[in-house]
Each structure stands twice: as structure tokens, then as C-alpha cells.
Image: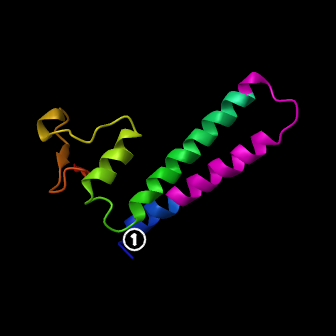
Amino acid sequence: MGTFPENIAHFTHGMAFMFFIFVGAHLYWQQNKSRLLWFLFYEVIFFAFIEMKDMVYLIEGVWYTDYLTRILLSLDMDTGTKKESDFSDPYCQLSEQPEKLILSM
């Protein structure tokens, strides 16, 4: 399985995904929607897609497949090719795997 904080993180991703799905369904079937509610509906569905995309990382070995990692990170508007010198924050460090960012204080 994994460590307790890792399991909590996966659990909250699942909760957020279900929240966005239920709110999106509620907004879709609501009567007499204004333009603002339509915009909110599309925004919530977009966030549900982002959460669903992040669940791909739960599959074993995705972090070590460079091709898949670059595709998934490109959907987040990031190329995943940052170097340690690109981070100006002294609390940000890269681990041995360049795809995983570790925040340490």
C-alpha cells in the first residue's frame, strides 16, 4: 500500500474527484441556468478531469516512464524539464527522480 500520509493524499484525491463529479451533475440538471452557472459547470467538469488525470499516477511505475510523465505534466501546462537551478526558492529541492518535487523545510 504505502505510508499513512500517502494513503491520506490518495483518499483526498478521490474525495475531490467525487465532489467535482457530484457538483457537475447537480449543475448539469439544474433548471434555468444562467451564464454564470454554465461557466461554473464547465469549470467543475474541468477540475474533475484534472483529478481523474492525476489518478493515473497511482499506477505503479508511471513516475518512471518518461513518456507518460511528460504527457501528464504537459496537461498541467508544465514540461517537467526543470532543473534544480530553475527553482529560486531555497526550500525547493529535487529528489533523485527529476519528476518528483520534494518540499523540505
Question: Coloring scheme of the render?
Answer: rainbow
Residue 67 locus on image (x, y percent): 29, 51
* Quadrant showing the N terminus: bottom left
> Callout 1 environment at 10 Å: few (<14), some (14 to 19), or many (20+)?
few
Going 39% across and 59% down the picture, which residue do you hit?
A: 57
Going 25% across and 53% down the picture, which residue do you hit?
A: 66
Residue 96 locus on image (x, y percent): 14, 57
28 versus 11 height, above or below: above
13 or 68, which is in the foreground?
68
Residue at the front extreme of this rendering:
67
Q: Residue beneath label 1, please?
A: 4
Q: Is residue 17 left or right of residue 23?
A: left
Q: Could you tell me the amino acid type at mark 1?
A: Phe
Residue 58 locus on image (x, y percent): 41, 64
Residue 16 locus on image (x, y percent): 57, 52
**Segment colored magenta:** 13-36
Q: Is residue 4 left or right of residue 47?
A: left
Q: Count all numbered tags in the image, as a single digit.
A: 1
Indicate whether residue 92 is drawn in magenta: no
Going 36% across and 73% down the picture, which residue do you hit?
A: 2
Residue at the right extreme of this rendering:
31
Dominant SS type (magenta) = helix
Give the secondary structure at mark 1: helix
Going 40% across and 39% down the picture, which residue do you hit?
A: 76
Q: Is residue 3 left or right of residue 24?
A: left
Residue at the top extreme of this rendering:
35
78 versus 53 height, above or below: above
32 versus 13 height, above or below: above
Residue at the bottom extreme of this rendering:
1
